[in-house]
Image (cartoon, rainbow, N blue to C red):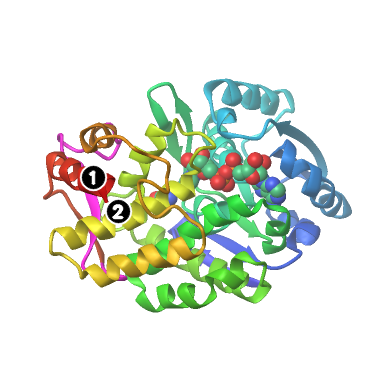
Amino acid sequence: METLTVELGARSYPILIGDGLIRKIGEHVAPLLKRPRTMIVTDAHVADHYLIPLGTSLAMENISISSFVLEPGEGTKSWAGLARLTEWLIGEGVERGDHVIALGGGVIGDLVGFACSIVKRGCNFIQVPTTLLAQVDSSVGGKTAINVRAGKNLIGAFHQPAMVVIDPTTLETLPRRELGAGYAEVVKYGLIDDADFFAWCEANGAALLAGDSVARHKAIAHSVAAKARIVAADERETQDIRALLNLGHSFGHALEAETGYSDRLLHGEAVAAGMVLAHQFSAANGLCRTEDAMRVRDHLASLDLPHSLASAGVNIGGAELAAHMAHDKKVRGGKLPLILTRGIGQSFVTDKFGLDRVAAFLDGQRAA
Ligand code: NAD
Ligand code: GLY
């Protein structure tokens, strides 16, 4: 087992990574608890595979448990989902000192984290992520949220977990398409500031997606260490450091909005195409070499990830796509900060480019 730490002073917490950890989780959770009681929240897909092993391990430490199983899917991260969950937690007698366990992907992690930030003015939670996206990104850093009619993740809070427990073997039951979507977030860490890691991805991405356990462990540990460093440096995204984690997200959000935040294009798939667009936009504006943008596109394309407007299933005008970007919650004073790049592993934040320039670029990509 490997242990990393998110260094946040009194709110620091460990990230445990190890094959089979779900079956041993009780021994790690028990020392945190003020009373031998915890509540597990999960979704129906994840419950089928992991609720019993996790519950059994807790029971072996004499921890009493109750569990709440929600419907899988983005729709659960909603006012209705939040109401059901918070009412259930209160009905279960949750106390401020308790630790609620979020067992699942980013949907469960974001919803449970937000519920725990408001129930009884805040209780503790433990992230047990079971998708690659959640293991390398959403379970670490304390961003929690639900979606509302006006957009995704618009109601939320920063609320750090007390511990993150990553069992990479859970990825063996994850559908291949979800694994690919999570892999885009792995590649993102190379593209932000780590050219060597991008080269490692080029050499090992296919093996990882085929189930190679050594590659899987390395990708998760490396990604999570990068995320922990970034969160420790800029927890609330006030210094243009954490914002780098949004590489590919502004273009990606436009694609997701256009495809209705649906199964037509998963979040990680939109990020994959968005990262290629961010590199191509950088190249088109003389910021980075065209060969770097092609390298990013070729790697993602080789793994069947969306790498263009067409492969993301989007065929509309640049102005319409740019209009989606104008609604991004990162807009400041009418300007959208973009994450662009000077080359592989050299990303930076800028608000120098207007959306008219982005629209013209996207028109060119549509025709390409
Ligand atoms: P998800 O939670 O919807 O999970 C994807 C699907 O896989 C679901 O059907 C789920 O039931 C199933 N599943 C999960 N683990 C499984 C397993 N081990 N075996 C079989 N099936 C399994 O999706 P996601 O991609 O994990 O998360 C997406 C969410 O994460 C979005 O809402 C996004 O906004 C959020 N997110 C949050 C952050 C953050 O920092 N908080 C970062 C990135 C994304
Ligand atoms: N996933 C973006 C962030 O945590 O900041």
Residue at image position (33%, 57%) is: 276
Compared to 233, does 157 lie above or below?
A: above
Specify whether residue 269 is in view. yes
Q: Residue farthest to the front?
A: 367
Quadrant assignment, res 318: top left
Asked if the residue under mark 1 is in contact with the one under mark 2, i.e. CB atoms within 8 Å, the reply is yes
Cβ of mark 1 under 8 A from ligand 1: no
In this figure, which residue is indicated by the disc labeled 1? 362
Q: Nearer the viewer, residue 76 or 174?
A: 174
The disc at residue 187 is none
Residue at image position (47%, 44%) is: 267
In this figure, which residue is indicated by the disc labeled 2? 277
Q: CA distance from mark 2 to mark 1?
A: 8 Å
Cβ of mark 2 under 8 A from ligand 2: no
* Upstream in sequence: badge 2 or badge 1: 2
Residue 349 screen position, x and y as percent: 22, 55
Quadrant assignment, res 135: bottom right
| Range of magenta residues | 327-346
Image position of 3 (left or right of 53): left
Specify whether residue 229 is in view. no
> Three-letter amino acid code at disc 1?
Leu
Residue at image position (88%, 54%) is: 60
Question: Mark 1, residues whose alpha carbon is within 10 Å: few (<14), some, or many (≥20)?
Answer: many
Residue 1 screen position, x and y as percent: 68, 72
Mark 1 residue element: helix
Residue 320 screen position, x and y as percent: 25, 31
Image position of 286 (left or right of 24): left
Q: Main secondary structure of the magenta part?
A: loop
> Three-letter amino acid code at disc 2?
Leu
Compared to 180, does 354 lie above or below?
A: above
Residue 333 among those drawn in magenta: yes
Compared to 352, does 88 lie above or below?
A: above
